[in-house]
Amino acid sequence: MSEQVQIRVNGVAMTVPGGITIAAALLNAEVNGFRRSVSGEMRGPLCGMGVCYECRATVNGRAHRKTCQIVVRDGLEVTTDEL
Amino acid sequence: MSTDISAGASAIVIGAGIVGAACALELADAGFAVTVVDAGPVGGGATAAGMGHVVVMDDSPAQLALTRYSQQLWTQLQTVLPPQAEIMRCGTIWVAADAEEMAEVERKRHRYLEEQIPCDVLDAGRLYQLEPNLRPGLAGGLLIQQDSVVYPPTIAAWMLDRVTEKGGTVRTHTQVDRVEPHCVILSNGDRLAGDVIVNAAGAVAPRLTPGLHIKQRKGHLIITDRYPNFVRHQLVELGYLKSAHQSDGDSVAFNVQPRPSGQLLIGSSRQYDESRAVDHVIVAKMVARAIEYMPAIAELSATRVWTGFRAATPDKLPLIGPSPANDGLWLAAGHEGLGITTSLATARLLVDQIMGRTSAIPVAPYLPSRAASEAMHV
Ligand SMILES: Cc1cc2nc3c(=O)[nH]c(=O)nc-3n(C[C@H](O)[C@H](O)[C@H](O)COP(=O)(O)OP(=O)(O)OC[C@H]3O[C@@H](n4cnc5c(N)ncnc54)[C@H](O)[C@@H]3O)c2cc1C
Ligand code: FES
């Protein structure tokens, strides 16, 4: 396994394997609700390949980033359950 | 000109866009037995493609009179519309890029105040306070508080529900093939007779009433994902006046609208082009223009781009009144980029003429006969 990196999820530090996607890191940590739909339902990754947009979360302050398409890096900040 | 209307007279409205729907409701209120016919669904034409900005505009005195009157009617209607109308009283900020445009802000303010339309001149500092995502270095702007934003397709549907309640009939997915005196012939050969026929077919109105000076003027819009409070007012570059006025040639302008969902509508483009296809070159120009005014737009994600057709007339004013072509035929078409705003006044002025009532504003500038008689100015 590649070396570990530190990310923060909703303000909480988390050590995860390098080389995986944010979506994978969150799912490993049993975070299932990534964002809320217009009507307020929880949503999380579906396709895992950048097509469905269901895995969006706020990454480094930018809203609606597709977390299944971004590889974790040291110091990355993720906020879930926003929009 | 007025038609002799006896009790129980019938009217057929061709087109269930916002203009046709407003005319149908006004006719039903006046006591007509109304039938509305549309080739597609309710509100599926330009009415679904536009921005829904209810805005007072002052390109010409006649445009100012019509948009101002219509906005007063919107203010009344908004008190009874359902939540699906998505009314946002967000106001408009006309953004001035430089000193020259600030001088135009002053002239615009003057014209608005003459019509008792409240407005505030914003200096650069106040502009950033209100809209922090605008780029630094802009000169200021003009805030028109009473302009609003609505969602037109659901309003057209609401109006036609009222028409149905009053005993009217709405026939969607029914194509009109041609219009004859006091009669509409459907593409399946059926004939519908009416004392009054209204052509409210938007940008394709000339297909039913040949000879109308209406051209299809294509526009693109982009909708983004949800970014609440990214913008708070409808923002339009003051240079918009220059680009919208340009009669031929393609143009883009910075025009951004907040939606209640937190999404942004980003416009706008103008092209004489009959194809519905998205033109990526002009979309790229539109995005570049938006980013020029609001650099942070580059960070947002867009979810959809589409096109729609404005019904452009040579003098930028709609055709509201009797058709010179055909007895019993009335026109309510040619609303260019303002048909959401001007739909309510259109319906009122049209039915005033049909009923022989005096109108709140002079109808002469919008009479279809002007186009036949007058030399066109552009
Ligand atoms: C990109 C864009 C942005 C815009 N933004 C704004 C804005 O912010 N504010 C504003 O006020 N206006 C705006 N507009 C303009 C506005 O959308 C239009 O002026 C308005 O929707 C016109 O309404 P309408 O009912 O005349 O036409 P439409 O909505 O096009 O309705 C015409 C209807 O007639 C039907 N029809 C046509 N031919 C036939 C036939 N033969 N038989 C049966 N039915 C037929 C069509 O199916 C259609 O439903 C915008 C337009 C565009 C394209
Ligand atoms: S899970 Fe479908 S786009 Fe990310």
Image: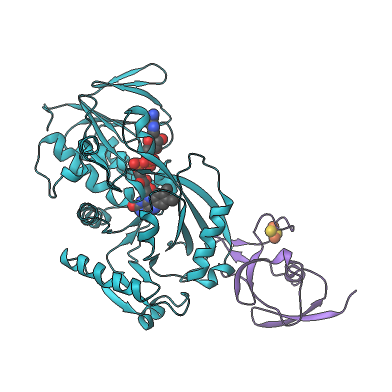
Chain colours: A purple, B cyan
Front residue of this view, candidates B173 and B79: B173
- Give the farthest residue toward the top: B189
x, y percent for residue A76? 71, 79
Residue B134 horizontal side relative to residue A5, left or right: left
Please tell me which residue is depicted at 51% across the width and 56% down the height of the picture: B222
Is residue A59 depicted above or below B352 in this figure? below
Can the viewer see residue B157 in this picture? Answer: no
x, y percent for residue A77? 67, 79
x, y percent for residue B70? 23, 52
Can the viewer see residue B15 in this picture? Answer: yes
Indicate the quadrant of ligand 2 in the picture: bottom right
Find residue B320 and report its image quarter. top left
The N terminus of chain A lies in quadrant: bottom right
Find residue A69 and report its image quarter. bottom right
Please tell me which residue is depicted at 57% across the width and 59% down the height of the picture: B302
Please tell me which residue is depicted at 43% across the width and 34% down the height of the picture: B40
